[in-house]
Amino acid sequence: MSRLTPIRFQDTDLDAIAEASGRVAILVTPEGKLDLGGRRVNRLTRGAVARLVASDRFAKAKSGQVISLAWPAGLAADALDILVLDRKADKVAARKAGAALAKVKDKAALTLLAGNAKEAADLALGLALRDYRFDAYKSAGDDPQDSGAVVMYHSRSQEIADAAAPLLAVAEGAHMTRDLVNEPANVLTTTEFAARLAEMTELGLTVELLEEDELEKLGMRALLCVGQGSASPSRVVVMQWNGGAADDAPLALVGKGVVFDTGGISLKPAAGMEDMTMDMGGAGVVAGTMRALALRKARANVVGLVGLVENMPSGEATRPGDVVRSMQGTTIEVINTDAEGRLVLSDVMWYAQDRFKPTAMIDLATLTGAIIIGLGHENAGVFSNDDDLCNAFLKAAGAEGEGAWRMPLGKAYDDLIKSRIADIKNTGGRPAGSITAAQFLARFVKEDTPWIHLDIAGVASVKSDTDFAPKGATGWGVAALNRLVRDRFEQE
């Protein structure tokens, strides 16, 4: 796993600034006000900061922007970064500002003079989230993943360190999600994925692996039919974090883990198929969230379940027109083998409810291209049978700066997935494609289970940089789910 940038919090030491290596960063308000550290740096650089503040360049700068001065006189550092930041910046704005620093920082060490900034912990989170690279397969350099450490000076360093600790646990969870989603499919097989999840027992998680023979006994034929064309065995991994009261029902998180999706017999076009290494994005978010909860010792009971399969064409593969029986007992006509994620989720969702009797259930999946047509890459699609739970999630996602938008459900859409020969078919065609996929999943939600379905096809991995991640896997959802657990399910 890629390493989180080390961030050390210290009381402000003005005398150490001149000899700091790498880069030095100071905070300046949009009005040009300098704090104690900024004034010391200004004196050391013989007024360079003051001259910049008086310039047209600074006048055009916006809060959250970084202006860099290379090889500043009076400092041993290679560069001086001036971070323009409003004193009243909220948590999301502070995180974006930290991410902006991480972009210019690259692999260099950084000394950040945060003064008495109120949201310094969120500044650190943004920096940690954005200071990520997936270089595991590049041969240049001795340690391409290595990133220079950060020292943050603050007038209340211990208070900020305590506030930052649970936030940095979220950053580590997001990094795990990104690593999993970015991995090539010849490395992240179902076997390797399960092994990485099993390693989290060292964090206090209980991790259980269900093999194909056990899944067969449980009746998970919908899940098994997706992977039967692949040499990689299908698996379900169950991760339990028991941080709440022993008799509290857990929150269940369920993730689609298709480690590679060719479409099966309904083969996808060759162009762009390489992106299907990210089709396990839902399982990746569940894994990253469970890691974050364990690292910060969340006072809640949460169970994460992921269905790991590979969808390949072969003589053993499921055919369009086949009928399979789910664990619940519903028969499913497979119209399109490329609508496979809902088959995986249907069995794992039913198993989660049958075994754990959860207080609520949230599934995540890179499920449909239709959600990208509707929402682009800014928002995940949110479908729910429970307004209170849905609103709580939307509030959590908004507070964490992760885009999410509620989509409709309704009985009228069920007509599109009626089957002539079975109880239901696995796709209703192009119209309302993301909604009919959600309606399919709703068939496997028990009447008394509050449920959310998150279609993350547009946000799990993107082609350009985001505020908090370089292009590629984003780690979307770890922060929002962690916030939901904290706000709604965690004990005082």
Image (cartoon, rainbow, N blue to C red):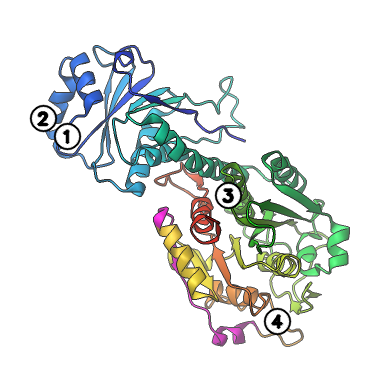
Residue range corresponding to the magenta coloring: 399-417
Q: Residues within 10 Å of mark 3 (few under 14, many from 20)?
A: many
Amino acid beneath label 1: Phe
Per the rendering, the mark at residue 128 is: none
Q: Does the magenta run of residues contain 400? A: yes
Residue holding disc 3: 298
- Pointer 1 or 3: first along the chain: 1
Which of the two residues, 20 or 23, is positioned nearer the viewer here? 20
Which of the two residues, 392 or 467, is positioned nearer the viewer here? 392
- Pointer 4 or 2: first along the chain: 2
- Pointer 4 or 1: first along the chain: 1
Asked whether residue 278 is in view, the answer is yes
Q: Are marks 1 and 2 in contact (CB under 8 Å)?
A: yes
User: How much space separates mark 1 and mark 2, taking CA atoms?
Assistant: 7 Å
Residue at image location 49% in from the left, 26% down from the top = 147
User: How much space separates mark 4 and mark 2, taking CA atoms?
Assistant: 68 Å
- In front: label 1 or label 3: 3
User: How much space separates mark 1 and mark 3, taking CA atoms?
Assistant: 43 Å
In percent of width and height, residue 125 lies at 43, 40
Residue at image location 74% in from the left, 44% down from the top = 198
Is residue 426 rendered to the left or right of residue 321? left
- In front: label 3 or label 4: 3
Q: Residues within 10 Å of mark 4 (few under 14, many from 20)?
A: many
User: How much space separates mark 4 and mark 1, taking CA atoms?
Assistant: 62 Å
SS of the residue under disc 3? loop
Quick check: 100 above or below 458? above
- Pointer 2 or 3: first along the chain: 2
Residue holding disc 2: 54
